Amino acid sequence: MSEQITVGVGAGAQYLGVDRVVDLGPLHPSAHGAYRLRLTVTPDLLITAAEPLVGHLHRGAEKLFEVRDYRQVLTLANRHDWLSAFCNELAVALAVERMTGMDVPARAQWLRALLCELNRLMAHMVFLTPLSPNAAAYREGVQALMEEASGGRIHFMFNRIGGLREDVPAGWTSRVFDFLSTVDFSALPVSFAALEGLGVLSHADALAYGVTGPIGRASGVDFDLRRDDPLPAYRSLSFAPVVRTEGDAAARVRCLLDEARLSVALSLSCLEQLPSGPVNVRLPKAIKAPEGSVYTRVEAPLGTSGVHLSSRGEKTPWRLKLRTPSFNNVQALSALLPGTRVDDLPAVLSSFAVIVGDIDK
């Protein structure tokens, strides 16, 4: 006879009235926040149905945007997914730039692409650290470079409407090149045998739930905005997205590793083609987007990060709706967890990259 149990994930899960807490370790990003899973299990603890229960870390970001001008919005836009800060800033900046018809200087376009790839490399190293502790050193290295460029360690606040806040420091590009030249992914051993066949997400279910990013590509979803809806700099970069078909926990971790390799290669290409020139445009005292709406999206580390901006011609947005990858991705747990044993939950969830703040935006 089946029964229902509720498990919690994250440091705050013990306060949510759950039957047990799934401990993924202090290094896993899910330790910041909490969400619950309502599971239907057989007497031998085989999961037959699963329902993610979110909303325990509600941040109210979309309503906060509506009472701030466009410059101020960017300082909040990087906080819902604290591992994708630069990409989240960029999605909002793009929306305003497209509505106002603003031309962003070429150097800023290339630096944006470079910083997006460094942001992706940093985020993937964070998710890989619990599985391969050596990844922490690479995460620290790339985070130090992002901090040197922006002044922020987590919340970079480096994008501006019309480009970047300022140019990168002298010698920074050489230091990026030197660091990337030392990255050796063979030094990141992962025990894939323990992950094979666990938590399989089918291609059809990934499409049905709108799963994007490395989780979707691990299930055969051949979709990557860097290729399919590229920003200007990416149009000059030739690459193939990392796509696998197995859809299990091992495939998701392999996608993270392979995408980290790809980010290193793309970053080096950006350094080779980086032009000189200004990195921003002169702005009026108050930025007002014309009346209308626009939707922009970027390939954030965990998938599609979209912004639907509606304006009534004022200096604050009338509505700014976020499409965050973690919100869609976490719903897919209801499709991939049935057939999994409760004891295997830590291994499956460790391979499933989400940020709780990105869910409860």
Image: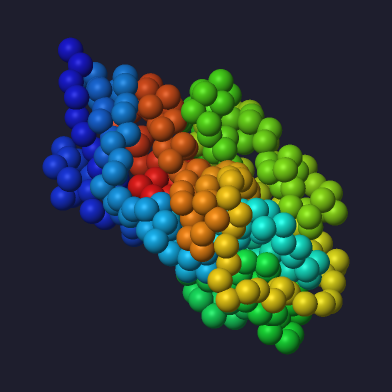
Q: Nearer the viewer, residue 145 or 320?
A: 320
Q: Is residue 290 above or below residue 43?
A: below
Question: Residue shown at 51%/76% (left/top)?
Answer: 152
Q: Nearer the viewer, residue 159 or 123?
A: 159
Query: Percent from the top left, x then y, of residue 350?
Result: 42, 45
Asked whether residue 248 is in view, the answer is yes
Query: Percent from the top left, x then y, of residue 197?
Result: 50, 28
Q: Quadrant of residue 31?
A: bottom left
Q: Is residue 220 left or right of 227 when viewed as pictured?
A: left
Asked whether residue 127 is in view, the answer is no
Q: Nearer the viewer, residue 347 or 360?
A: 360
Q: Is residue 115 above or below residue 36?
A: below
Question: Residue shown at 84%/76% (left/top)?
Answer: 276
Question: Residue shown at 59%/80% (left/top)?
Answer: 148
Q: Is residue 335 above or below residue 20?
A: above
Query: Percent from the top left, x then y, of residue 287?
Result: 58, 67
